[in-house]
Amino acid sequence: MEQSRGAYHRTPFFIVFVLLLLKLVLLRYFFFAGVEITRLAADALAVLVLLSILELVTPARIKGPVYWGCNLIFSLLLFSSTLYFAHFNSVPTYTALNELHQVTGIQSSIQSTIRWIDFIYFADILVLALLWVVNRAKGVRVPGRRPVWKIGVALVLVLSLSGSATFIQLGKSITNELVQAENLGFLDYQVAAALKAREENLTIQNGNIKDTISRVNQLQLTYPYHSPERAITGESPKYFGAARGKNVIIVQMEAFQNFPIHLKVGGQEVTPVLNRLAAEGMYFPNVFQQIGQGNTSDAEFISNTSIYPTGTVAMSTGYGDRILPSLPSLLRKYNYETNTFHVNEASFWNRIKLYPALGFDRYYDKPAYNNDHFNEFGASDEELYRLGVDKLSAVSQSGRPFYGQFVTVSSHFPFKVPEDRVRITVPDSMKGTQLGDYIQAVNYADYAVGTLIDSLKAKGLWDQTMLVLYGDHFGLQSKDNDPAVVSQQLGIKYDPRINRFNIPLLIHLPGENKGIVIDQVGGQLDIMPTVANLLGISLKEENFTAFGHDLLNVDKNIVGMRYYLPTGSFFNNEIVFVPGQGFEDGTAVSLKTRQPVSDLAPYKEDYEYILKLMNLSDEYVKLLPKR
């Protein structure tokens, strides 16, 4: 009897070990579309570390509930991580999981990603709970631990810790987060992320921002942004001051990819308003998103600061307590009043701190608008623009120029437009699909931009205002949209990386009616320097550190991307590059032909440059003083 009880005593350890390991196998299947048996050693060692600690510190009388609770928490963690990966296509770290409370703000978006198979993580929970209840009813008691068992568990702990440490050390040099997570396993990946953050923070503690700025400037001088001819002649920047003293409105369009521009579906223009703006102003068709964990809020951060997101935390959450060099702060020196408009609560993604940090004088969030119940956020883009133009008109009447930022949400995932607001009919083959819903959503968003323009004209502001519009990030979810199907449905060649991350940028100058296409490759980092040039503001003379460049005055460009693509990914004038474990096993696709590029050698310097530049950007933002 005593022997059987001893065996029972050890049973939870082995059962939970097997269950947790099986769940990590399932996670690997969801994340990496398959399971390599050789990778499971890292998962097994990490689980052994966790359970050995529990076994050694847990009193025998509560061991059953503790193991059951551990299994439940672990299941919730993996379930949440699977939903996160499905929505963002990135392996979440502990910093991303800290932001799970933001889910309530995009509840319908998250619900749309849940599949019935995701609940398989909890399949064993009910069975274990029932077994525990039965055993309690029978009066089964677990005897005290035998010394030999405790010694064995301690030895397992030491060996598994040593093995996990070896895996983490071997994976330390991998910059591609997805490859690193696959090599290390989910649990050790969290440890590696924490260790990396600790090393970076220790470096920052001894850092000097002036030294960092100097190294940023020196590094950027090594990249040929300007042709030798331009560098030699030192010609004045093109379009410098073309909108000097004018009002500025920047519209950040939710989930707006570039492919709908000039697209027709069923003979109907998807974006007639933006098409007209492109025909009358500046259109930049080769601009790409660069957001990190903060998604839409990161886009606001990037476009106003020209600083890379760190990728490890939403910039509003991690750096909303800093004094951020930014476009609003810069424009204050030129007597601009700066306002930002968003129909959601300012607490969402910590904008309540981000907006003051960016230097906005005022923000108008959810309580300021009439709720016309467009979607889960409440007010529609039309209502957003109505209130915004009224407030900006009052600023203009006071005699001051204004900068107004609008953050739209009517084209937010899952792209459901109320039936009475639908303005375009999609073909039957698209009805009920995410692609069809997306076309209707961006069409409505385009229509709403038209109401903004009409309101500006009615208030006498159109001829005194520079209008800038850009997309914050992709819309179509990769798991729900086969590129071949999208290509066939729309009559375009849809590349899962190039088209997915390609966003529009349009700029309309007062009094201009002749369009120009700027083919230069760029990113959201480049918006602020481009706008500053048009306003006649020299960032060099202002001693402003920007990691992007004026797209009207560069001959070659490179923009890095992380998070939705692994660190080290970049777009330059020729390709999009995505690393493997490093550069040599990376892949590249031509931006022009959409075909794979086999010879990577010419781009190694670009890869090394962008890694250095992004690291310096991280160092710079972490050294900014707190407010």
Image (spheres, helix red, strand yellow):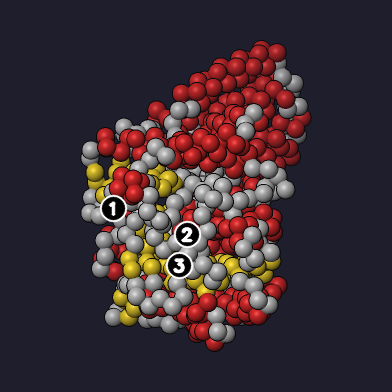
Q: Residue at x 70, y 44 (%)?
A: 626
x then y, percent, for residue 293: 54, 49
Label 1's element?
loop
Residue tagged 3: 242
Locate residue 619 relative to residue 582 in the image: left or right: right
Instruction: Give the mark nearer the N terminus: 1 vs 2.
Output: 2
Instruction: Give the mark nearer the N terminus: 3 vs 2.
Output: 3
Label 3's element?
loop
Residue 313 appears in the rendering: yes
In this rendered view, identify the residue nearer to me: 622 or 171: 622
Q: Tell me if residue 127 comes above or below residue 204 in the rendering.
A: below
In this rendered view, identify the residue nearer to me: 235 or 299: 235
The disc labelled 3 sits on which kind of residue?
Ala
Residue tagged 1: 591
Disc on res. 533: 2
Instruction: Give the mark nearer the N terminus: 3 vs 1.
Output: 3
Q: Residue at x 57, y 77 (%)?
A: 385
The disc labelled 2 sits on which kind of residue?
Asn
x then y, percent, for residue 120: 51, 48
Real-space CA distance between mark 3 and mark 2, rounded to the nearest whole angstrom: 8 Å
